Amino acid sequence: MNHKRPPVPAVIVIALLVIVSAYFIVTQTLGDGNGTLTASGTIEATIVNLSPEMAGKVKEVLVEEGQSVTMGDPVLILDDSLLAAQREVTQSGIASAQSALLTAQSASDMAQAQYDVALTAARAQEGSQRLADWSKNTPNWFEQPLWYFSQDEQIVAAQVEVEASLQALQQAQTDLESVIQNLSNANFVAAETRLSNARMGYLIAKSVDNHAQITGGKVSPEDVDVHIPMRAPSAYRVKIAIAKDMSGESDILNVSQDALDAADAELDEAEEAYKDLLTSDAANRVLEARAAVSVAQERYEVALDTLSSLQTGEYSQQVTIAAMGLEQAKTALGQAESAVHQAEANLALLDTQITKLTVYAPMDGVILTRNIEAGEFVQPGSIAFAMADLNNITITVYVPEDRYGQTTLGQQAQVTVDSFPGETFTAEVIHIADQAEFTPRNVQTVEGRSSTVYAIKLKVTDSEGKLKIGMPADVVFK
């Protein structure tokens, strides 16, 4: 592959540029024959870009390029119509939240009053029982007096017993079901079922037979004028039969009586069958399981009754319910207060956002560039203006490494510019770089290291504001 070389004249030009650049860097800091250190640079100033914090449409631009501004002067205003409308809505929300807060406060006060009334009434009812605990003799089965344990401790113990008795009842019911499902107990269980059904059938037949008796508007048994010895069997039923016959309803009585007799006969047979199996092992197992359920059920009921009897005074159900209502009312009150605080925080946020729609000058200075016009839409962070503080002028020059030791912080210097020939400005060294730079490029030869330089920054005094950013200037160090 053929590589084209640059023309000879181009090579010569590049070499001359390198030589001239190196010569300029070196000669600008050689100074005069007396060893005075000189350097050249350009006038600088701190430039600040002004950007809006909020997005929006530009309503008004208040400054022009080159205009001097003072810190705090407004320079840009964005349209606030949308945020103003949101602020009105938020203010309305605050009013609603405050109204809800008043309602919640009233409800809380009412709940507190109801709790106080319930507690007072409960304490009044508890008084006699509390005094009785002090006056009663200690039961023989206890060594401690009745007042030994506090009411709260007794309630906790009763609650433990309620839970334990409930678990025992559930276990007894499970055991009974297991016994009933056991095939070895099937005959006795069937006899129990027959007896249960027969008893219920007899009760229902008895009730139906009673309904068949004569009621108002018909002949009553008491109206039957027949002398029947009251000690005779079914004397009253004889009068009922006569009254039925006189009322024309003897068939109803006969049918109901037949049904009752049949139910009675079935009950007798069921009881006999049940008794025949009572001596069996199956009967013993089933009866024991049923007894366990009955005892467990009664234990649970007594535990509940005991707990209820202990729940007096501030522990009574009325007070507990009132306390729950009070707690709910307080929770609602807290939520209402939070709603008010949230609405007020939203309003404060909107006020802050509205304030951010106006951009202010962060310092004294001059507007260098203006990048927006009225009617444009800007985004947060977009650069609207660039400004500089021309009262804080600096210049940065570069000193070769072999002259670096001749500069110190606070060292004075004189600055001259072409725009004001014959006039000098005072300057002071405010920063010396702690790392060298290679100019115009990184060189590796001994001769090339003579172009290694350090940046020196000076603050220039310009009380009349004559110096401008970008002016070339010469510096003579004293």
Image (spheres, rainbow, N blue to C red):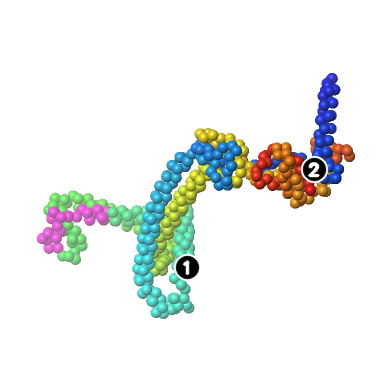
Q: Which mark is residue 38?
A: 2
Whether 18 is drawn above or below 307: the answer is above
Residue nearest the viewer, comparing 288 with 215: 215
Question: Is 175 or 140 nearer to us in this picture?
Answer: 140
Which type of secondary structure does the marked residue at label 1 adopt? helix
What is the number of callouts on the image?
2
Left or right position of 291 against 227: right
User: Furthest-top residue in view?
Assistant: 2
Q: Amino acid at mark 1?
A: Ala
In magenta segment, residue 220: yes
Q: Which residues are magenta?
A: 205-228
**Which numbered circle lies on residue 157?**
1
Tell whether position 23 is magenta.
no
Query: 60 or 291: which is nearer to us?
Result: 60
Which residue lies at the image location 15% right of the left edge and 53% below the top edge? 244
x and y percent of residue 203 in the render? Answer: 29, 56
Q: Amino acid at mark 2?
A: Thr
Q: Quadrant of residue 24?
A: top right
Q: Quadrant of the N terminus?
A: top right
Image point (70%, 39%), residue name: 420
Q: Secondary structure at mark 2?
A: strand
Residue 317, x across and y down, in percent: 39, 63
Characterize the local packing of mark 1: few (<14), some (14-19) or many (20 or more) Cα atoms within 10 angstroms: few
Alpha carbons under labels 1 and 2: distance apart: 98 Å
Q: Horizontal placement of 201 versus 339: left or right?
A: left
Q: Earlier in the sequence, mark 1 or mark 2?
A: 2
Residue 382 in view (yes/no): no
Does any portion of residue 128 appear in the rendered image? yes
